Image (spheres, rainbow, N blue to C red):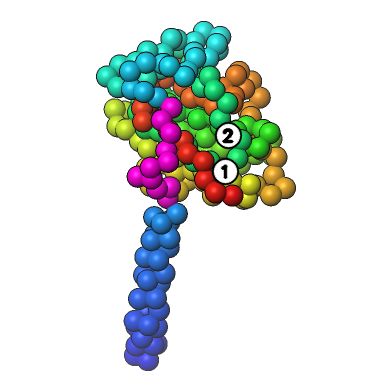
């Protein structure tokens, strides 16, 4: 009986500490999430028109339209999307939007943004509908590098997509779940080779998938 009693005493002492550590970790992640209620956010979409945006000239693209306060990007033959017409900041910024998949089986939001003098993309729902990650890192796309993760996305549900770019890190969230926490020192950050490069400097694209995006905004943050 001594061994079970010892094991029970061990769990009685250690388990509360583990639970506390998990709770503190969750709290730390919650506190790390960008403050969406801050007053210094700048809207990139007026909810009524494509002012400030242009259609990305992908081969075989569909033409985005504004519907009920959102930008709808219909499924094209491959990539379809939009680009901002103004130059975004290259560093020390946060970017957020809401996106939902209407129809299709691949990424419904590929958010391309600057990183210093380069660019990269946060892929949401790629490679058959579930892969999340950054393309590309050290020549590896979102399905190959350490930022790769998998989520089951529901059709017709809005998801909050948020990124933060600083000299030390690229961070990204789906809703309030942190999906990317990439330290960028000595890493090569670049776009995946191909037509998606037309999304620079800041763009949103889909792959044979109809999607909607809304509440697109960014803010500069301190160094």
* Label 2: element kind: loop
Query: Which residue occupies the foreground of this view, 3 or 196?
Result: 196
Q: Residue at the far bottom: name it.
A: 2
Compared with 109, 222 (above or below) is below
Q: Residue at point 47% right, 39% down? A: 219
Dot 2 crowding, Cα within 10 Å, few <14, some 14–19, many 20+: some
Residue 37 is left or right of residue 184, and the answer is left
Residue 185, horizontal then vertical, whole percent: 69, 49
Q: Residue at the far front: name it.
A: 39
Compared with 124, 29 (above or below) is below
Query: Which residue occupies the foreground of this view, 144 or 218?
Result: 218
Labels 2 and 1 touching (C-beta < 8 A): yes
> Can residue 131 be seen here?
no
Q: Residue at point 40% right, 79% down? A: 14
Magenta region: which residues? 33-44
Query: Which residue occupies the foreground of this view, 94 or 181?
Result: 94
Q: Residue at the far right: name it.
A: 186
Residue 175, horizontal then vertical, whole percent: 37, 42
Snapshot quadrant of residue 170: top right
* Label 1: element kind: loop
Q: Which mark is residue 89?
A: 2
Query: Any magenta on residue 36?
Result: yes
Q: Residue at point 66% right, 37% down? A: 116
> Can residue 133 be seen here?
yes
Q: Which mark is residue 92?
A: 1
Query: Any magenta on residue 11?
Result: no
Dot 1 crowding, Cα within 10 Å, few <14, some 14–19, many 20+: some
Residue 55, horizontal then vertical, whole percent: 49, 13
Label 2 vs label 1: CA separation? 8 Å
Snapshot quadrant of residue 102: top left
């Amino acid at each position: 009986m001594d061994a079970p009693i010892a094991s029970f005493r061990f769990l009685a002492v250690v388990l509360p500490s583990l639970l506390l550590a998990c709770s503190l970790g969750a709290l730390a992640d919650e506190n790390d999430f960008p403050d969406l209620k801050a007053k210094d956010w700048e809207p990139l979409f007026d909810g009524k028109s494509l002012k400030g945006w242009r259609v990305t000239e992908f081969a075989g693209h569909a033409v985005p339209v504004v519907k009920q306060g959102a930008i709808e990007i219909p499924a094209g033959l491959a990539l379809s999307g939009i680009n901002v017409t103004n130059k975004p900041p290259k560093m020390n910024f946060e970017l957020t939007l809401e996106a939902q998949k209407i129809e299709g089986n691949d990424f419904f939001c590929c958010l391309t943004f600057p990183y210093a003098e380069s660019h990269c993309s946060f892929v949401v729902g790629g490679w058959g509908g579930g892969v999340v990650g950054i393309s590309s890192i050290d020549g590896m796309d979102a399905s190959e590098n350490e930022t790769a993760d998998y989520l089951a996305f529901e059709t017709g549900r809005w998801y909050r997509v948020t990124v933060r770019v600083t000299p030390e890190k690229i961070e990204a969230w789906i809703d309030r779940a942190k999906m990317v926490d990439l330290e960028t020192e000595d890493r090569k950050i670049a776009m995946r080779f191909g037509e998606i490069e037309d999304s620079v400097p800041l763009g949103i694209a889909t792959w044979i998938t109809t999607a909607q995006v809304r509440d697109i905004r960014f803010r500069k943050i301190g160094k």
